[in-house]
Amino acid sequence: MNDIARNDDSHARLDQLAEISQRLLDRARALGASQAEVSCSEEYGLNVSVRMGEVETVESSRDRGIAVTVYFGQRKGSASTADLHEGSLEATVEQACAIARYTEDDPAAGLADAALMASEFPDLDTWHPWRLDADEAVDLALACEAAGREADARVSNSDGASFGSGGSLSVYANSHGFVGRERETQHSLGVALIAGQGDGMQRDGWYSIGLARDDLEAAAAIGRRAAERTAARLDPRSAPTGQFPVLYSAEVARSLVGHLLNAVSGGALYRRASFLLDSAGTRLFPEWFAIDERPLLRHGLRSTAFDADGVATRDSALVAGGVLQRYVLGSYSARKLGLPTTANAGGVHNLQVAANAGSLEEMLSGMGRGLLVTELMGQGVNGVTGDYSRGAAGFWVEDGAIAYAVDELTIAGNLREMFAGIEAVGSEYDPRSHVRTGPILVGRMTVAGGE
């Protein structure tokens, strides 16, 4: 057993949070609540930032929070505290009960059905604490920045490098008798660099993120990749204006999946604020296109055996054969829509977009002439109509190869048409997100450049 495992008190701290949760549930019941739920969490972290070889910030944090929600029939009240003293805990429950007594009935309020609670809790390999001190963290950030600054003479400045390491412990419990415990770590290292001079300066960077220290790319490799990306953006030109294929690089392609998720989430649907109302069971994508949710994936960035309502998660398809199989619902939004929960209270867990193409280079070769997008700006997406218009930067592609950098352009379309017009998904996915997708090629969009 190594020193980290020997000194790990996370299970004891989870026991303490579970005991606090049970006391709060008992008190809520004694005050007349028909149902109650408690979320308890502890978080710790070490974050450092450096710039131009000098330390800028070193922050160590340790936070905790307790949230209590009670139901008196279909009236709901919530209160929270960060104070574990008995008097504060007691006052928090009393405040939640007082709020509930003065709220209106909500037919959708209440815990998820007891029969849906998770009963199996596999080890999903999400706990990998990294015991390092501030000096070691600073050294990693400095090494990352130095590698980037030294990799290319055109790199003239730095926006800084940062390193972060932390973990969280959480317990969710409710009056069904459910108690769920989770622990997770996350570590990150990245740098942003500036290349060129005066009005011709360009900025870009790179970062790595993972649950364990071994998941991170080496500091020098991150710095060199940041320098390569930054220098590649120098001397941008204007892009042609017209209708062209648009290839989203993997790191920005997941934004398209994000727009889909927003449109099929319960909150948008029951508020009638989505362009995909009544779309479950309909074809939105090409027949080969698929997205699977894998919440029980070992070592996944968002793996869990239960959602924020305590409902057991399971692997399931979101899109299969191009058809939207279901919405993304927690128990509350499901009741509002008259549908069963999909165990997505709190969000989705580890989405995998199926690939039908090869590497980025192969996709560029296949598209011939068009735009490779590596950065998106602005929030020009209308969730009600699906209209899409965003600032973009990247590279113009001629004869299947990158010709030159482009910036200050706009790409536009309608998300429903863009989804249907996806021609390929590459095999090289970006591992830094719980949405795993390779580059996505949309066959035709409006590109507005300066030419």
Image (cartoon, helix red, strand yellow):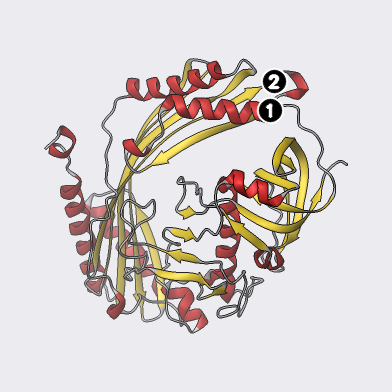
With 215 as the anchor, is 447 left or right in this view?
right
Is 108 situated above or below 143? Answer: below
**Residue at position x 14%, y 34% in the image:** 2
* Element type at mark 2: loop
Residue 103 visible to the viewer: no
Q: Position of residue 377 (x, y in %)?
A: 68, 45
Is disc 1 surrounded by few (<14), some (14 to 19) or many (20+) residues within 10 Å?
A: many
With 439 as the anchor, is 393 left or right in this view?
right
The disc label shown at residue 111, or none: none
Residues 64 and 218: in front is: 218
Q: Looking at the image, is mark 2 or mark 1 earlier in the sequence?
A: 2
Q: Amino acid at mark 2?
A: Gly
Is disc 2 surrounded by few (<14), some (14 to 19) or many (20+) residues within 10 Å?
A: some
* Element type at mark 1: strand
Kindly identify which residue carries mark 2: 196
Q: Position of residue 244 (x, y in %)?
A: 78, 53
Residue 330 visible to the viewer: yes
Residues 5 and 98: in front is: 5
Q: Answer yes or no: do the residues labelled 2 and 1 have beta carbons within 8 Å?
A: yes
Residues 39 and 374: in front is: 374
Query: On the rendered image, what quadrant is the N terminus found in?
Result: top left
Q: In the current view of this chain or complex, which residue is farthest to the right?
A: 451
Q: Amino acid at mark 1?
A: Gln
Marks 2 and 1, how far apart in space?
A: 6 Å
Query: On the rendered image, what quadrant is the C terminus found in?
Result: top right
**Residue at position x 76%, y 55% in the image:** 412
Q: Position of residue 183 (x, y in %)?
A: 27, 50
Is 369 situated above or below 445? Answer: above
Number of dots carrying numbers: 2
Kindly identify which residue carries mark 1: 202
Q: Position of residue 30 (x, y in %)?
A: 22, 72
Q: Quadrant of residue 189?
A: top left
